[in-house]
Image (tube, rainbow, N blue to C red):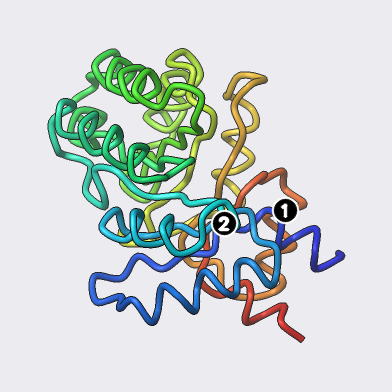
Amino acid sequence: MDKNEILKRVDHTQLKAYATWEDIVTLCDEAIEFGTASVCVPPAYIGRIHETYGDKINICTVVGFPLGYSVTEAKVAETQKAIEDGANEIDMVVNISDVKNGLYGKVEEEIRALKKACGDKTLKVIIETCYLTQEEKIAMCRAVTAAGADYIKTSTGFGTGGATLEDVRLFKEHIGPNVKIKAAGGISTLEDLEAFVEAGCDRIGTSRAVGLLRD
């Protein structure tokens, strides 16, 4: 598979708690050089990235990250601030406790509230598959679709497991036609990158893609 085809689907990611500005600059410079879809960064860096790079870079950030159990109002406020600071894409974490309690309608309403806050910006919904049963994953496919989100995303990368091809195939079977798929977490080889793209992922969240494809 052509490396540029892979790179244009990559959200080049740096979400570690100890990420420095130097780390973020390296990330952004690599994203521009290699033509990744975006950089996915901590909310605290959005404004500085936007001031430094302007429209040269597409900024993605995270909301309710990584555990998802913030109240909806807090997630909405995070989303609004991120967009105000210059983010174009929001990766939100669902309230996993609500999912485990079977409160699928409540989860759908939260996703809908964040999509409203996003307006014409992109909303990706992280459902953290490693904690969910197959029934719960299917319910989240339906909730993401009904709420009008743009993407369903497998994982935060901070849970007990990451993306699997089985989950991507399950998503494809149960999401609506307007929902795309993002895989993240544990994608660490060129073979992984190719497999997830071939399985139908429009985006891949990883910190490793540029290093793997640089040469």
In space, the residues marked 2 and 1 are separated at their CA atoms by 22 Å
Give the number of the disc on residue 97.
none
Percent coordinates x, y for residue 179 in the rendering: 59, 27
**Measured along the vertical axis of the image, is residue 26 above or below residue 14?**
below
Q: Is residue 89 left or right of residue 69?
A: right
* SS state under label 2: loop
**Dot 2 alpha-carbon crowd within 10 angstroms: few under 14, some 14 to 19, many 20 or more:** many
Quadrant containing the C terminus in the rendered view: bottom right
Percent coordinates x, y for residue 120 in the rendering: 51, 24
Give the number of the disc on residue 197.
1
Q: Residue at x 45, y 23 (%)?
A: 144
Identify the residue position indicated by label 2 in the image.
Answer: 57
Q: Earlier in the sequence, mark 2 or mark 1?
A: 2
Quadrant containing the N terminus in the rendered view: bottom right
User: Callout 1, which amino acid?
Assistant: Val
In front here: 207 or 45?
45
Give the label, 2 or 1, closer to the camera.
2
In front here: 42 or 175?
42
Percent coordinates x, y for residue 153 in the rendering: 48, 42
Q: Is residue 188 left or right of residue 142?
A: right
